[in-house]
Image (spheres, helix red, strand yellow):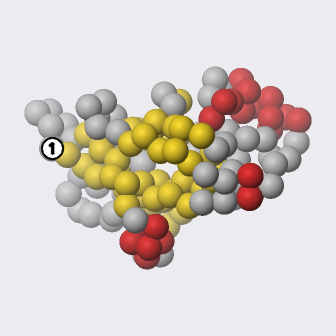
Amino acid sequence: MRSIIRAVLASGIAALFVSVACGAEETASVYFYRYRQFQGSALTPSVYCDEGQLARMENGRYFVVHLAPGVHICRSNDKQSGVQLEVKPGEEYYLRVELVVGMMKGHGRLVLTPKEQGAFEIKKLKPMDSNKVSAQIAP
């Protein structure tokens, strides 16, 4: 367990996450997901929270991170768009990554979706491999 905590501290985004020793009811679950679509399927936009990169979002996939209570700023690689979340312990939040056409390539944007909609939409998606998500604390 200490090696996991050291790895999180070394990643530079330790303030974002709570150690494994904390219970799930002390953190908030934030789900990031992307629809499975043919258009832009080869693109993997980055997802950031508090300027720490969490993952490169794959087509038709989702992942979850557990954040400490408080205010967190999440965005994708489109810097003019983002979401400021005030997360509360035990709550679930859903952020959908959408592709926006750019001049030379597409960019990702995050869209905060209602809990009921997000929970429904991720049922049709596959979880991302855990080795592709940085500092993922929970399963």
Q: Residue furthest left?
A: 103
Left or right: 61, with 131 as reference point: left
The relative height of residue 137 versus residue 7 in the rendered view (above or below) is: below
The residue that label 1 is drawn on is 101
Check disc 1: other Cα within 10 Å, few if <14, some if 14-19, many if 20+: few
Q: Is residue 22 rendered to the left or right of residue 33?
A: right
Residue 128: image location, x then y, percent? 53, 57
**What is the quadrant of residue 41 in the picture?**
bottom left
The residue drawn where x is 88% and y is 42% is: 1
Residue type at mark 1: give it: Val
Q: Height in image: 70 above or below 12?
A: below
Q: Position of residue 24 (x, y in %)?
A: 74, 57
Along the line of sight, the residue nearer the viewer: 131 or 53:
53
Q: Is residue 32 positioned above or below 55 on the image?
A: below
Q: Is residue 8 left or right of residue 31?
A: right
Q: Secondary structure at mark 1?
A: loop
Q: Image height check: is 72 above or below 97? A: above
Is residue 64 visible in the rendered structure shown here?
Answer: no
Q: Along the horizontal axis of the image, is 51 left or right of 117?
A: right
Q: What percent of the width, then of the height, locates residue 129?
A: 58, 55
Quarter occupied by the C terminus: bottom right
- Name the residue at 39% across, 38% down: 75
Task: Using the rendered image of the protein, determine whether residue 92 is visible from the camera's viewpoint.
Answer: yes
Residue sitting at x 47%, y 44%: 85
